[in-house]
Amino acid sequence: MPAIRKNNKGFRLLFEFWSKYHQLDASHIAWARTHVGIVPVRRGQVLHRVGEKRRMVFLVCEGLLARVDYIEFKERIKRKITSIALPHFALTSTSHLYSRTPTSGDIVALRSGIVIIIPYDAIISFKEDDPAVETLIDVLTNRKKRQLETYLRVIHSTSPFQRYLLFDRLMPEIRRVTNQNEQADFLGISRRTVQEASYFLLTGKRPKK
């Protein structure tokens, strides 16, 4: 892999990940310097709002991103987290590179960190001449697809309590880095259920009513 300046942390993290899947050279660094945005993000920062026309890939280098919807429930606004991106996962502003229909929900930083932002147009134009970008997008797409399949299995389980136990078993990497409120909003269950299931996992006992 070509040398990346050590003080350019975002690029270094990107190329360390990318080079695991494809041999890279100076042309890829030149492409990234021209088209890729390295964005330090703060917890709670909105990177993309629902309905925006920008078509972007948001790749997490450090931190945590989520796709968030807000729904009205009993005269209150309730947060619904429909997707979570760990480091080396990505969220996109549409369902695929050639779609112009925005995906529902804002893209929000759940944790401070570093995010790589890549415009669709830069990906589409470059991947026609070089398979390295297509490889990167395929890796990110397959990771997200597997995570979505697991998530759907979890949220379609029989009861809120069992849903959390399945979440702990099948998605431990997300459970470890999220708090109880985020887990409740991700799984569509109450925080009390999260607390009861967490207690059960810790002690093997259900809390006394």
Image (cartoon, rainbow, N blue to C red):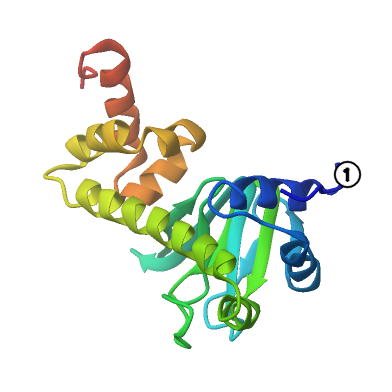
Quadrant in which residue 41 is drawn: bottom right
Is residue 59 depicted above or below 168 in this figure? below
203 relative position to 176: left or right = left
Q: SS of the residue at dot 1?
A: loop
* Residue located 44% across and 86% down the image: 101
Q: Is the C terminus in the top left, top right, bottom left or bottom right quadrant?
A: top left
Left or right of residue 175, residue 23 in this image = right
Q: Residues within 10 Å of mark 1 (few under 14, many from 20)?
A: few
Q: Position of residue 59 (x, y in %)?
A: 59, 58
Q: Position of residue 87 (x, y in %)?
A: 57, 45
Which residue shows up at 33% across the image and 34% down it? 194
Task: Say whether residue 157 is visible.
Answer: yes
Task: Describe residue 113's horizontal placement relative to residue 17 as left or right.
Answer: right
Q: Is residue 110 visible?
A: no
Q: Give x and y (percent) for residue 20.
A: 56, 46
Residue that badge 1 annotates: 7
> The disc labelled 1 sits on which kind of residue?
Asn
* Residue at the image point whose x is 49% and y is 38% from the top: 178
